[in-house]
Amino acid sequence: MRKLFLCMLVLFSIIISGCTEEKDNRIVNVNTRNWDNIVDSSKGTIVNLYTYIDKEEFITYVDKYIKPNLKTEHDITLRLIIDDYVDIIDRLENYKATEDENGEMDLIWVEGSKINEFISKDYVFGPYTNQLPNMEIYLDNNKYENSMYYGMDLMDSFLPFGRSQMVLFYNEEIVDEAPLSVDQLMTYVKSNNGKFSYPEAKSKLGREFINTVIINEIGERAILSLSGKESDEEILNVIKPGIDVLKEMNPYLWNQGQGYPLDEKELIDLYIAGEINMAMSSDQFFVENNELDDFPGDTYSFVFDKGTVSSYSYLCIPYNSLNKSGAMVTANYLLNPDAQGIKYNPSNWGNLPVIDPSRLNDSEFKKMKKIRIKKYSIDYTEFYTKSIPNIPKELDLKIAKIWYNEVYKK
């Protein structure tokens, strides 16, 4: 009787829609249904994946790999819609204002830095990630970024999908070996006056490096004890060991620390010109993805043993999606090792996997290791084990202000 009732309910909803060209979305209460039922109810449906992140590599990844595989394995038709961030937010706000429960967006790929707006305005459906098998299989729930981001509780409503990580690189013909700790970097900087620099704190990369040094010095627990709501003085009392390191380093930097590159591009230009022997990027595969003919000598990437700052992106389901089942199955699929490995391959995209390498079985791990990473890059296992959580935005900006007051000199 229950199956008959459900069939009649679905048929009725199709009839009253009056439009066979619309999405074949079945309104289901996925909170109380087991995974097999969710998968079954998603078959034959259309999932609209929205994002404002207009990356050619991502579009190719979805069109070439995800769409055909998702259709073959789950009979789901995936539509990718690139829209402006403001337009996505305006649409969600309009849904809320008009109490429209028939949303066109089923899944949204969003950067971690945007999560606060989605949470504070109650735009997302959840919890849902705790119902995904691949979340349980491949992600470590104790890892900070899988449950928190920028100091915000993800509430099982945002699924980690991709990440990038700050990387440093050096000219191997001049630098004997990479400094794998802040102490080793300090030794190098003092012994090679004027041959190191980093962007000032107005730039994303500059803040990533500053935060990396601070967290390496004081530890993750100390930095995560701060929310950014504290006064500048209270924050400085906690991060002072890291600030002191940056102050000590300052006179030995390029231009005697009297000025810093404005951004990543200016820093890279100094490196290409041979004015500095080390540089860095927010793109973990920067060296691999760029023309090495422009670089002096042999350029190799490295990260500190205690880690460098990483940035995550997530998948969320809008509160009024009509195809939550299809969205969940799609999200779960995007977390499997094949989908994560395809986007990790620098020849495809070069976006780091979020899955824990220790949770892969032997065949999955071997398959991931076979992905060709050039000798001057770092593989995913090292990136994963040497990553540092991002910090709350408010704290990030206050640390930048402290850096200008305590370290920067003109």
Image (cartoon, rainbow, N blue to C red):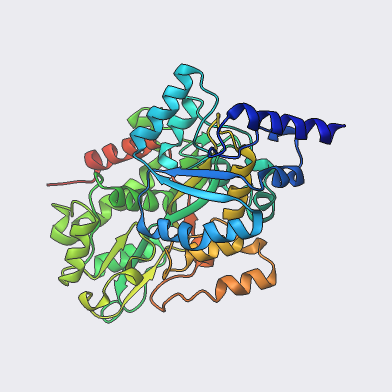
**Looking at the picture, does residue 235 appear above or below residue 197?**
above
Which is nearer the eye, 322 or 252?
A: 322
Residue 290 seen in the current view? yes
**Residue 96: horizontal and vertical position, in percent?**
48, 21
Would you say 197 lies left or right of 34 here? left
Would you say 307 lies left or right of 326 here? left
Callout count:
0
* Residue displayed at 45% across by 17% down: 97
State which quadrant residue 170 falls in: bottom left
Q: Quadrant of the N terminus?
A: top right
**Residue 18: horizontal and vertical position, in percent?**
58, 30
* Residue displayed at 41% across by 71% down: 347
Which is nearer the eye, 336 or 383?
A: 336
State which quadrant residue 37 falls in: top right
Residue located farthest toward the right when viewing the structure as drawn: 1
* Residue displayed at 51% across by 22% down: 100
Which is nearer the eye, 36 or 266?
A: 36
Which is nearer the eye, 183 or 348?
A: 348
Would you say 234 lies left or right of 173 here? right
**Residue 359: horizontal and vertical position, in percent?**
66, 61
Residue located farthest toward the top when viewing the structure as drawn: 98
Would you say 272 lies left or right of 225 here? left
Residue 193 seen in the current view? no
**Residue 168: horizontal and vertical position, in percent?**
34, 64
